[in-house]
Image: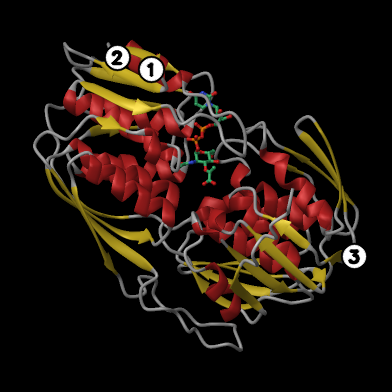
Amino acid sequence: MDVIRVVGGARLAGSVPVEGAKNSALKLMAAALLAPGRTVISNVPRITDIAIMGEVLRRLGCEVTFAAESDPVPASPTVSPVPDSLPVSRASTVTIDVPPMPGCEADYDLVRRLRASICVLGPLLARCGQVRVAHPGGDAIGSRGLDMHVAGLARMGADIANEHGFVIASAPRGLHGATIWLDFPSVGATENLVMAAVLADGVTEIDNAAREPEIVDICTMLNQMGAQIDGAGSATLRIEGVPELRPVRHATIGDRIVGGTWAFAAAMTQGDVTVRGVSSTFLEIALDKVATAGGTVDTTDDGFRVRMDRRPRAVDVVTLPFPGFATDLLPMAIGLASVSEGASLVTENIFDGRFMFVNELVRLGADIKTDGHHAVVRGRERLSGAPVRATDIRAGAGLVIAGLCADGVTEISHVHHIDRGYPNYVADLCSLGVQVERLAAPQEPAYRM
Ligand code: EPU
């Protein structure tokens, strides 16, 4: 296991490209299962989660190949004193050859490593009439229920049960259209239900559906495949089932969470960062918070630029489903609050374990008190470098940025979490002019009994 070593007291300056969104690409790959033949998805980030999804699809009988793309993001004028020195292959094009009838079982050994593999449930049930997917359980950010996935599929005619650690579903007479009200606009449930509904008999209406840009991306691809989905990006989706779909080529939208990470990193380090490859419209509330904290935010042709030339002012943040402030940016919001002037109230409404990483930030000297789903953060002028542990993808990325705002050196361990979501994190940070390196972790000492 590697560690990331960060030399603090640094300022980020330059231009950074952002690849396709992890949380879109994973679902686009699952959606390929809906049509036999060759689907090609480009701008897929080169991260561990995508490799695991490739393996999930291989085990279902698909042939999956990854080809390195040259930098897919058009160059834009850089504000950096450091020239863009990008690795040639930041993203992949993935080709998925789906057999006439895919397998229908996803095992725990892969599902436990990639919660998102639950998104094969909907497409496999629609294609094969039966499916057995290991129950992924909760994870470091909280309990992650499946009740809405299960209830929605049941309304569409599936017999569905949780047995011996597996979600087992069958629809011997096929799925049919239904009206489904989601208790909460769950991203995963919306995606699974849409992928089941596109091949169901009749019309499905999903109310209180998730509205994230990744939902719009998958609906766009499904419509290109021949599906009939209306309302993507709104709270009501209307899906008229069709008998079959055809494979397509599709480019993944840019990763708004990676883009947002750079926005907060620029603000926290009083830097100047131009982000390329992700639309600012995906990040309106997050960028508004950065502006309220004292930053200057400009939209560019293919992204945005964030400048901060003062110590940030404290801002309050409340996470909500899109278009609200994204829960995946909560560690960055708490990081910003930790170095801001004044006190911030940060409220998390999506995951019950999202504050778990806060103790690591406290190790860096942050003044944070949590109570239920609220955190009060009193900003400090500087943090103080220390060894810390990444507890999940976003917390890991946030701790690295916090390390840049600390005196001395910060070493972040368990960086495999960061590899799950940030394709070139250390190289990108270096290209923005700061001293960050990845090292093999020191051996743990053996204790005698
Ligand atoms: N929930 C239920 N029952 C369900 C479904 C969800 O109780 O049937 C609850 C969850 O337990 C959670 C909340 O609803 O408390 C939101 O869950 P949602 O289904 O919206 O999230 P998800 O689909 O599991 C995706 C992203 C997450 C992101 C959330 C929210 C992927 C692979 N994951 O998760 O991304 O935080 O939406 O936007 O798309 C990450 O990338 O680091 C990450 C965690």
Between 306 and 131, which is closer to the camera in this rendering?
131
Label 3 vs 2, first from the N-terminus: 2
What is the distance, in whole Å, between disc 1 and disc 2 at their CAs? 7 Å
Q: Secondary structure at mark 2?
A: loop
For label 3, the SS is loop
Marks 1 and 2 close (CB-CB < 8 Å): yes
Amino acid type at mark 3:
Glu
- Mark 1 or mark 3: whose residue is earlier in sequence: 1
What residue is drawn where x is 27% and y is 40%? 31
Q: State which quadrant residue 351 falls in.
A: top right
Q: Are marks 3 and 2 in contact (CB under 8 Å)?
A: no
Image position, residue 363 (x, y; %) = 82, 55
In percent of width and height, residue 368 lies at 85, 46
Q: Is residue 272 left or right of residue 235?
A: right
Question: For numbered disc 1, what is the local secondary structure?
Answer: helix
> In the current view of this chain or complex, which residue is farthest to the left?
100
Q: Residues within 10 Å of mark 2 (few under 14, many from 20)?
A: many
Where is mark 3, residue-wise? 381
Q: Check residue 250 in the rendering and tell me which mark sits there, or answer none.
A: none
Could you tell me the amino acid type at mark 1?
A: Gly
Q: Residues within 10 Å of mark 1 (few under 14, many from 20)?
A: many
Image height check: is 230 above or below 438? above
Label 1, label 3: how many angstroms apart (C-alpha)? 49 Å
Which quarter of the rendering shows the N terminus? bottom right
Residue that carries the numbered disc 2 in the rendered image: 156
- Say if disc 3 is inside 8 Å of ligand 1: no
The residue wearing badge 1 is 152
